Amino acid sequence: MPSDYVYHSDFWFEEPEESNPFAAKASYCHGYDVYGQVIAKAGWFEYLLLMFKGERPRPDEAVLLEKLALVLANQGPKEASIRAAMNGGVAATNHSSALMSALAVGSGLYGGSQELEICIRLWEECGQDVDRWKSRLQAPEEDERADIWPAIEHPPGFDPNGDQIPTTLLQSLELLVQFAPKDGALHWLQKQRGALEEFFGCPISITSVAAAAFVDLGLDRDQGSMLYLMLRLPGAAVHALEQRKMGWKKFPFYSSAIELEDDPGPFKQRDEEGGR
Amino acid sequence: MNHEQLLETESHWLTRIGKAFLTERVVMHGKDLHHELDHLEWLHLYLYCILGKDPGENVAKMLNSYWVGTSYPDPSIWPNHVAALAGSVRTTPSLGLMAGLSISEASIYGRRPEVRALDFFYRAGRWCDEGGMLEEFVDHEKSLGRILYGYGRPLATTDERIAFTLDKAKEYGFSEGRYLKMAFSVYEHLNTTYGYSMNVAAVHAALAADMGFSCEEYQLILTPCFVAGMAPCFRDTKSRREGSFFPIRCESIVYHGREKRHWEG
C-alpha cells in the first residue's frame, strides 16, 4: 500500500524495482534516463546544468561552468571558508563538519554566497546600465527592514580591503570571458571594471566575476548561490585534509595575539586588593 | 592603500569581550568565569555573553520560557526531522543537531519571522511616536505586499504557546509592556480586517521589544532555541532500525515534469 505521505518533484522521477518499492530500477532527470544514458554520455557540468536548468546545455555553456568551477575550486588558505575547514581538519574533526564550517563561513556577505546573491539580484535590476550599477551598488538593500542577514558593508562584488585586482582574479576573468557570450555579463564586466573600480576606490572581487558567469549561464540568484557554495568545497576539503596530516603543532594558535583591553586581572588578587 | 587596514589586525586583536588565559583563568565581559559567573544557569550566562551585561533574573526566566515552550520532541517539525534523519542514518549528535539548528534560520518559522517581527514592532513604535496611528502602519505594511510575521500561521489557526507565554509574562512582570499591548492591537486589526490569527512569534517579539533587545541580540538569543527538542528525536531514530525513519518509496515521489526523452549523441 502506498504511503500517505508523498513528495512532489518537477524534475526527478523514479521507477521501482518490482521486488522492492523502496529501490529504484530507473531514475529520470527532466525526462532523461540518468543511469541508462546521462552518466554514459554526459559530462559532469552538462548534468549539473541539466539538473539546475531543466534543459541539456549547449557545449559552450558546460565549458563555461567547468572553467568557473576550476576558478572556484581552490581559493587557498587565505579564503575564509577554506580557513574554516582547516580549523576543523587540524583537530581531526568529522570531514562533514569541516565542510559544514566551510559552507557556513563561505555563505557571508564578504566574499561569500550571500554577496553573490546580491550581485545576481543587481544584474537582474541593472542589466548593462553602468550608471544604474553605480547607484545601486552604493545602496543595494531591498528595503529598510532588519533581517537575519545584516546589511552589506561595501559595494557588492568589490573588495574593500583590496587595492587593485589581483593577478589571479584578472587571469580568471580574462579566461572566462573567452568562453562567455559576446554580449553577456562577463564581457560587460571586463569592459566596465576599470571605471567601476575607479568610482568605488577598490577592485572587483571573485563574487562579481562568479555572479557574471552565472548570469551568462542563465542561472538565478538561488541557483548561483548553491553552485557557488558547492564549487568552492574542493579546496576546503583538500586543505582540511592537509592540516589534519600536518598536525596542530604547525597550525596557528592566536592566543598570544589576543589582547584584552580591560583585563581585570586574576580574581583572587583582586579579592585581596579589596576589589570585591 | 586599502590593504593597509588589514595590517593592524594581522597579528594583534584588541578586544573587550574577554579571553581564555589557558591554564590560569577565563574572563568574560570583565568577569571571572569560574568565580564570578559560576552561579548563573547556563541560559542566563548565554544572555550575559551576548549582551555583555546581566539582564537580570526576570529577563532570564522570561527567555527561558521561550526555550522551554518551543522544545517539542516531535520529528514532524522540520528542524527536528533533520536531527531524526541524522540519527536514522547513524551520523553524530553534533552534525545532526547543528544541521537542525542551521535550518531553524528559516523564512516561514524560526529566526527570520522572529527578527522581522521584532523589527516590525520597533518600526511601528517609531511610527506611533511620530504621531501616526498603529492601524495605518499595519495597513501601509500590507499595502507594500509585506508578510506581517507573527500573524497567520502556516500549519494551524491557533497557537498553543501563546497562553503559556502570557502566563509567564505575567509571572515575570512583562504583561503590561507597550509592545505586548501593541501586538494585541495589531492582532485585533488584522483579525477584523483580514481574518488573521496571531502566533507566538508576535508575542515573543513584542516581549523582546519590551525587554529592549536589538534584532541581532534577539537572533543570537534564539539561535539554540529548538535544540532541546532535537535531542530526543535523534535518540529515538538512533535506537531504531537504521534507515527506518519514514522511508520513501519510489512511487511517493510524485512527478510532474517532462515526459521521458532520449539523450542523443
Image: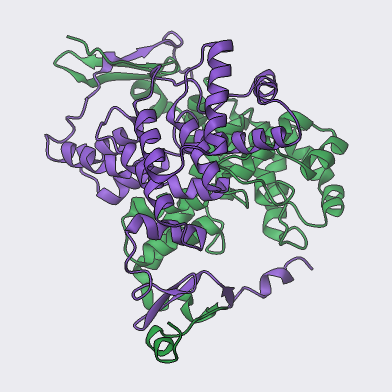
Chain colours: A green, B purple
Front one among B48 and B187: B187
Front one among B166 and A53: B166
**Which x, y percent locates residue B77?**
32, 29
A185 to A115, vertically: above or below: above
x 67%, y 58%: residue: A168
**Number of numbered callouts drawn:** 0
**Which x, y percent locates residue A99?**
41, 51
* Residue A56 in view: no
B187 to B124, vertically: above or below: above
Front one among A155 and A53: A155
Q: Is residue A60 left or right of residue A104?
A: right
**Which x, y percent locates residue B164?**
34, 33
Q: Is residue B49 left or right of residue B183?
A: left
* Residue A79 in view: yes
x 55%, y 12%: residue: B192
Front one among B215 and A60: B215
**Which x, y percent locates residue A214?**
63, 35
x 56%, y 57%: residue: A75
Q: Is residue A202 left or right of residue B161?
A: right
Instruction: Give the quadrant of the C terminus of chain A.
Output: bottom left
B49 to A108, vertically: above or below: below
Instruction: Give the quadrant of the N terminus of chain A.
Output: top left
